[in-house]
Image (cartoon, rainbow, N blue to C red):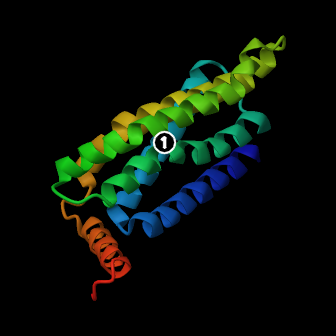
Amino acid sequence: QLLRFFRRAAALALTGIFLVSVLAVASVPVAAGITLVTGVAFVQVLGILAIEDVGFSALPAVSMIMSLGLTIDFVAHIVVAFQFETGPKMVRLQTAALHTFVPVVQAAVSSFLGFVMLAFSDFQFVVKYFFLVYLLVISLGLFNGLLVTPAVLYCIGSSDDVIGRACLEEREQRQRRSAGVAV
């Protein structure tokens, strides 16, 4: 019964990630890439938990569903930065990576600091079912966000910078209006 609900919750969460991503980046292929990388990180964590013999119960199931929300944080920053940059694809990718690397690493460090005390618990259950799960989510989320996502963007990201140009034009119009120049 739990496995059926877990699969349904994961599918609904990934569907939600896809739909919100389509709205955020205005590109179905890029939204699919975000969802794919998030799903891959999810499966990676599940695989390592199985190797580490973490039994499947309600606690890791809830943590895993929650991990989808944490993982998207690592993936979405670079994708949105890429979509809203202007220029050739490689330049957009490099600029997006430069602008998002520090915030993504800071998010990982702050998340880690939020749960690191679990590693020192006297109860092995807490270390195994909470600390390990969150450590894997943060580590694999960071790996997928900083290394896998740029590779996926290079392969499926649009080579056209329509969104970035539109944002640049809108910004320039606002600046001209604020300077008193007619548009």
Figure check: 165 above or below 32: below
Q: What residue occupies the far right of the structure in this picture?
A: 122
Residue at image x 35%, y 81%?
Answer: 177
Residue 86 placed where, x, y %? 23, 60
Horizontal placement of 26 versus 16: left or right? left
Q: Which amino acid is tagged 1?
A: Phe
Residue 110 placed where, x, y %? 61, 32
Residue at image x 78%, y 38%?
Answer: 58
Figure check: 177 above or below 165: below
Label 1 element class: helix
Q: Nearer the viewer, residue 53 or 135?
A: 135
Figure check: 49 above or below 9: above
Q: Nearer the viewer, residue 27 or 124?
A: 27
Figure check: 39 above or below 177: above
- Answer yes or no: is residue 27 visible: yes
Residue 55 placed where, x, y %? 72, 26
Q: Nearer the viewer, residue 94 or 169?
A: 169
Label 1 neighbourhood size at 10 Å, few (<14), some (14-19), many (20+)? many
Residue at image x 44%, y 67%?
Answer: 22
Please identify the quadrant where the C terminus is shown. Answer: bottom left
Instruction: Look at mark 1 in the image and give the residue it sits on.
Output: 74
